[in-house]
Image (tube, rainbow, N blue to C red):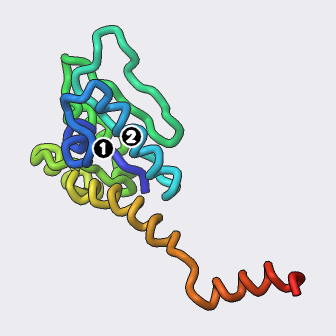
Amino acid sequence: MPYLIDGHNLIPKIPGIQLDDLDDEKMLIQVLQEYCQKNARDIEVYFDHAAPGGVRAKKHGRVIAHYVSEHESADAAIARHLQRLGKEARNWTVVTSDHQVQSITRRARARLLSSSDFAELLIAEPRKAEQDGSPLNKNEVAEWFRLFHEGDE
């Protein structure tokens, strides 16, 4: 299931990234790319206040970043995206904590996930990977020791 993300709404929920960081959007895109690679998901993230004359959308692997001009908000762009999707919106999850966007998401019958809840998913990924890389148990150590030292006798 692909995601539509309100980028500036999510950034403050991610440890180590702040809205006043110079590269806050780039940092978020990197986190999202890692998530997409591990989970085979597609993400479209929207950011407000794009630089005049700058790129409007840029693909970063499975992440598409949309940069919305000062004449529109990311909220309005997400609403327009949901409207374009029509009935297909049901196959998307919108990540936001903005009440207006949440309301639009419900009307479009898309799934909804708060920015805080999605941030928890992002944070849980590295923790899960660390746990999966647990050290060998005693039996495994003994087996490896036996295999590597069989010919030493």
The Cα–Cα distance between marks 1 and 2, rounded to whole angstroms, is: 6 Å
- Please give the residue where the numbered disc 2 appears in the rendered image: 44
Q: Is residue 145 left or right of residue 110?
A: right
Q: Please identify the residue farthest to the top as the structure is shown.
A: 53
- Local packing at callout 1 (Cα closer than 10 Å; few below 14, some 14-19, many 20+) is many
- Please give the residue where the numbered disc 1 appears in the rendered image: 5
**Quarter of image, res 112:** bottom left
Residue in front for this viewpoint, 87 or 89: 89
Q: How far across and down, in percent of the image, does residue 8 sit?
A: 22, 36
Q: Contact, CB < 8 Å: mark 1 with mark 2?
A: yes
Residue 131 drawn above or below residue 123: below
The answer to whether residue 22 shows anywhere in this view is: yes
Residue 139 drawn above or below residue 80: below
**Quarter of image, res 84:** top left
- The N terminus - image quarter: bottom left
Identity, as a three-letter code, of the amino acid under mark 2 = Glu
Q: In this view, does 79 lie to the left or right of 131?
A: left
Q: How far across and down, in percent of the image, does residue 40 sit?
A: 52, 55
